[in-house]
Amino acid sequence: MNHELEETSIEGPASIPGWGSLEFSRRLGLQALGATALAGGIASLSSATLAAAATKSHVIKIGYVTPSTGALADFAGPDKYVLSLIRASSYFKNGITIGGTKYSIQIITADSQSNPSIASQVTTQLIQKNGVDIIVTSSAPETTVPVSAVCEAAGVPCLSTVCPWEAWYSGLGGTLSAQGAATSGAFKYCSMFFFGVPEFVECFLPMWNRVQASTGANKVFGGMFPNDADGNAFRGAFPPIVTAMSGGKYSFVDGGAYTDLSSDYSSMISTFKNGKCDFFVNCPLPPDFNTFWKQASQQGYKPKLATVAKVMLFPTDVYALGALSNNIATDAWFTPYAPYKSSLTGMTGYQFAANYQKKTGQQWVQSMGSTYSLFEVVIQALKTVKNPHDRKAVAHALQHVNYVGMSGPLNFAAKTNPAPGVGIIKPVGIQWKPGTTATVGHKKWSWSPYVVDNTLNKHVPLTGALRPTNA
């Protein structure tokens, strides 16, 4: 069988990473459709997929669009390791029997270069040139929204992850109520798994409550929300959800809609100090948080607990801050400490992460778990269809997968899901602490993420104690 890694790469500008506001996500979807039209037309893509579906090829082609380069490249760091394990697993190595016919599986990767326009272009190429049956994709709206939009228009099954579901859903043309609930039904060909703004709040709020109870901290939180897609989305959604979930116990102080890549946060810091903001939340670009946090320390703003979004997900952010990283908290959707294992091989999450560290010399990162699960979900769906080239059948199967794998339990058809075809991962709260012990494998790291709150997912054991960020 052919397991050769085929890369698709197109020159293009890098974009700034972000989760994306709803309007921003809609524009990404429209931009993707515009790029598709320029690349050869949606109608021709649809015809191409129908023709491919009618073939009797014994090869199932899976396209994987990932930001291997550019501003989002940290998310794709473990890709080569993850794909090597996927390709070595039974179904990908030996083939899968569907409807009495043996099929081999080929994975074709394409680099989005962290650019929405490039993401839509390489997706179009995977469909037109490579004739893929399924496309999987990961890492922020800039990748997942344009890829999904092209697939939905072309009639190709697509599975996405690592993007708040609201941004993905809106980007594909879905509508949301004022409360953030989906109101326009399912998409025909696309599905996804991750979580949304309510889960961010549900992850952070229990940690606030515990620190408040132990320290008597002021029930006031400051928001570092930039004047960009992410900042405006969090500014609009996060505070009212906190109010609803806390019964109005916490009040919000807005630090002001600053410009990305600002160099002086003195005014914001003064606002937080005057507002007695003992809790802190944000969604900035990584270099902005680095600058802000250093200035906050110098100017004496030391919140009792910092719970950050979009930053401190990767060791690179942590090492850049050094000692100032101590006890900063964030969310985690995959950790090696959970009792989950691969549905393909039985490998545990701990083994998965420890082997990655041993083979690459790099510290494990949480995006590796969701990338692995993309291919687990595809196999689960293929097991239930009669013809893997039947686009509608495969898309329907993806939207109804219910299994337990590397990312834990995922039920795409659960009645509690926020939208049809959306599977929800329950994140846990982690804090970065000096890695005085080898928390995974035998290698010691200067800093490691410790699970300090499992309110949303009791399956994941605590590995450290929740401490105030500035004790």
Image (cartoon, rainbow, N blue to C red):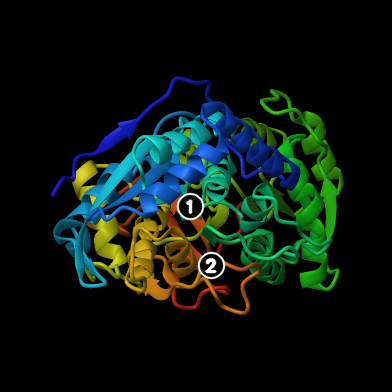
Q: Amino acid at mark 1?
A: Trp
Helix, strand or loop at disc 2?
A: strand
Query: Which residue occupies the foreground of this view, 234 or 405?
Result: 405
Say the numbered circle drawn on residue 423.
2
Q: Position of residue 118 (x, y in %)?
A: 50, 29
Q: Is residue 390 above or below residue 69?
A: below
Specify which label sits upstream in the sequence, 2 or 1.
2
Q: Position of residue 359 (x, y in %)?
A: 19, 46
Residue at 22% across, 49% down: 84
Left or right, residue 256 beside residue 470: right
Q: Please rate how many residues cluster around mark 2, counting C-alpha atoms within 10 Å: few if below 14, some from 14 to 19, many from 20.
A: many
Q: Are marks 2 and 1 in contact (CB under 8 Å)?
A: no
Q: Image quadrant of residue 97?
A: bottom left
Query: Which residue occupies the foreground of this view, 401 or 124?
Result: 124
Q: Amino acid at mark 2?
A: Gly
From where the camera sits, is residue 19 visible?
A: yes
Total marks placed: 2
Say the numbered circle drawn on residue 432.
1
Residue at 82% across, 31% down: 267
Query: Which residue occupies the foreground of this view, 385 or 470?
Result: 385
Q: Position of residue 93 (x, y in %)?
A: 16, 57
Q: Is residue 363 above or below residue 407?
A: above
